[in-house]
Image (spheres, rainbow, N blue to C red):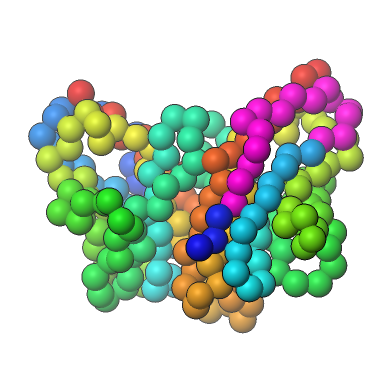
Amino acid sequence: GAVVSQHPSRVICKSGTSVKIECRSLDFQATTMFWYRQFPKQSLMLMATSNEGSKATYEQGVEKDKFLINHASLTLSTLTVTSAHPEDSSFYICSARDELRVDDNQPQHFGDGTRLSIL
Amino acid sequence: AQSVAQPEDQVNVAEGNPLTVKCTYSVSGNPYLFWYVQYPNRGLQFLLKYITGDNLVKGSYGFEAEFNKSQTSFHLKKPSALVSDSALYFCAVRENTGGFKTIFGAGTRLFVKA
């Protein structure tokens, strides 16, 4: 079945560091990928929709300059948390849809998430 | 605007008993509804979906969900719970405005006791 690979699974770094998270669709193409943030014991909050070959669409309240998204190919989107601070610590999850399937009501396929801890 | 509500933060059930995890939704037009499960430190796994057709939808791992249009509900059910079903469950609704943005409920933590 469709698989989404997210890397790294865990990052611990110092305040002020920039951190890049990769999201890859392994056996399908995805012109659209989604980036979510999940706080402990809370639901997923959609941060942005990543569009291959064009700018990402950010949700209200999400800082574009803080969370840089690049979707350079049909199988890879990256989220870079720039100048990370402790309040950016969270669980980040990406997802993608297999857009070549005839049924466009297919669910999203999720990566296993990245736990980001900023010291 | 689409929204989905999961009224219970936590559901406790004994192994072998039936379980229900509740979900209600608010959409304009036809709803596209989903259930996902999340295990610790993992992404979400798809369980089942309702787009159209039979109100009772069968999914993975023995789960099913009943779509009720008059009550705007989409409750997740399983006839006999397993300890391994303990996890975080999310109900979700997909926007039907042409995009594929999905709105998730707050999640319900299911504890199945042996």
* Picture quadrant where residue B14 is located: top right
* Picture quadrant where residue B16 is located: top right
The extreme front residue here reads B70
Rendered location of residue B19, percent (x, y):
82, 35
Q: Left of B73 or right of it: where is A32?
A: left
The extreme bottom residue here reads A102
State the quadrant of the C terminus of chain B. top right
Q: Is residue B13 magenta?
A: yes
Q: Can residue B112 be seen?
A: yes
Q: Can residue A9 be seen?
A: no
- In the displayed structure, B25 sits above or below A10; it is below
**Going 51% across and 75% down the picture, which residue do you hit?**
B97
* Picture quadrant where residue B106 is located: top right
Q: Is residue A66 magenta?
A: no
- In the displayed structure, A4 sits above or below B53; it is above
Nearer to me, B38 or A7 = B38
Rendered location of residue A10, percent (x, y):
34, 34
Rendered location of residue A32, percent (x, y):
40, 69
Nearer to me, B99 or A35 = B99
What range is drawn magenta here?
B4-19
Rendered location of residue A90, percent (x, y):
34, 35
Nearer to me, B107 or A11 = B107
**Going 38% across and 37% down the picture, which residue do you hit?**
A91
Q: Left of B43 or right of it: where is A6?
A: left
**Going 25% across and 75% down the picture, which residue do you hit?**
A54
Q: Left of A15 or right of it: where is B110?
A: right
Nearer to me, B88 or B66 = B66
Q: Left of B55 or right of it: where is A111?
A: left
- In the displayed structure, A73 sits above or below A79; it is below
